[in-house]
Amino acid sequence: MALNEYADLDGLSLGEMVRKGDVSAAELAEEAISRIEKHNPSLNAVVTKLYDIGRKAAEKPVEGPFMGVPFLLKDIMGDLEGVETRSGSRFMSGVPAAQDSTLTARFKASGVSILGKTNVPEFGLLPTTESALYGPARNPWNTNHSTGGSSGGSGAAVAAGIVPLAHANDGGGSIRIPAACCGLVGLKPTRARNPLGPVLGDVMGGLISEHVVSRTVRDSAAMLDCTEGAEPGDPYFAPPKERPYLEEVGRDPGKLRVAYSITDLEGKKLDPECIKAIEETAKLLSDLGHHVEEAAPAIPMDMMSGAFMAVWAAGLAAGIDAFAGATGQTPGDNELEGLTWGLYQAGKEVSAAEYQHALGAFQMLGREMARFHATHDVWLTTTLGAPPIELGTIDIGNRNALEAFAPVIDYVPFTALENATGQPAISLPLHWSETGLPVGVMFAAAFGNEGLLYRLAGQLEKAKPWAGRHPAVWN
């Protein structure tokens, strides 16, 4: 049957309908499949269709909070037994996953039906989703613009109403940036909140965090309740949560000490739309009873940027070489995009001593942020330095990373910091530009304090609701 309200309902609502027998999981799967077929030609959000797998799961859905809810995995680290994880690369082919990742298994246990995998830039390197293998994912609000990256396919699919939430991960902003570009909720959890097993324990010195993008705060919170927690053998783990995250949504956050910044960490002003978003949000927070003041942490950006690039490039090189060693292949510049090839070569030049110094820099940054959050509960910025860029802004064929990233050097001023420090941060859809593009507003909190972010996000979702705003490509 046609479920007319499908795209207007979040995952928890759909799961409750299945549990009550108001709709079947099979019917929900067909609703999602029909929307993939309708919208994917214009969005290029889903790059691997797994309809048979999803339909089979929907025949006997797992009883969880997201029972029978259609869901998509990201084509980076979204390992599903028997299915390739290509990471958006021509080089990564011919090796189906031997087993589900721990996170995939926990997604399944939440009740979802997995129907496909979503578009990514090669190895998740870019704040936009464009690759030689898959082509660009397109923003449902304006298809000439970027979805953000690297979880851009997931962002586009959720924003267009194809699924209510989808897998995403974040090594420098890759949950929060697509959330900002597509008008969604995107929380990067505390380091190690979600496990990376069973194969991996730590990726790029702890830069990588896993979670989802969603249209509602409560879907984000409920899924984190389903997936969080260490597994045996993890190298470290996040502090325990105080209570279920879903219970935090709607709970009074109290009077918070909010710092806000309308410049980047080097003192340069952001795009006027971003400044407007921050100032309007700061006023809203003040009206809600919070103490709001302009302040920023003291972050030495030269140290931050140098350390991040050393770990990022070395981690890329290690990943490519690990795949090459396991398959007997040799990576060639004809199989990797120019930008990837340049970063791969740079990564192979990072010495062990340089890598250790970079990890030490991350720890110093973590201590600075801990000092900052001792006097400020949350730090308010925009997620990006400007509204979503146009597709093609970054030349993925340029082997010179400095040249390739030059057009967007001021575009991603904040998000990598929380990856370096391991603390949680959330992007919320609280502003739209005059041209109708989403401008995400970001809140960062102290290490381990996702609960505070969910309390604040729930308050803001109620005070300035976004559920009624839909993109041009919708439902």
Image: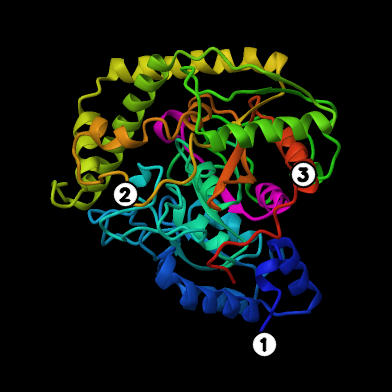
Label whose residue precedes the other's in the sequence (2 or 3): 2
Q: Is residue 203 rendered magenta in the image?
A: yes
Q: Secondary structure at mark 2?
A: helix
Image disc number at residue 1: 1
Residue on which the image places disc 3 = 458
The residue lying toward the viewer, choosing from 59 and 159, is: 159
Q: Residue at x 22, y 52 (%)?
A: 327
Region of the chain picked out in magenta, as a range: 202-225
Q: Is residue 130 above or below residue 260?
A: below
The residue lying toward the viewer, choosing from 466 and 19, is: 466
Q: Position of residue 134 (x, y in %)?
A: 31, 61
Q: Which-is-in-front pick, marks 2 and 3?
A: 3
How many marks can you see?
3
The residue lying toward the viewer, choosing from 304 and 322, is: 304
The N terminus, quarter of image: bottom right
Q: Residue at x 50, y 30 (%)?
A: 419
Alpha-carbon neighbours of circle 3 within 10 Å: few (<14), some, or many (≥20)?
A: many
Q: Is residue 62 visible?
A: no
Q: Position of residue 142 (x, y in %)?
A: 47, 59
Q: Residue at x 36, y 36 (%)?
A: 408
Label whose residue precedes the other's in the sequence (1 or 3): 1
Mark 2 residue type: Glu
Residue on which the image places disc 2 = 122
Mark 1 residue type: Met
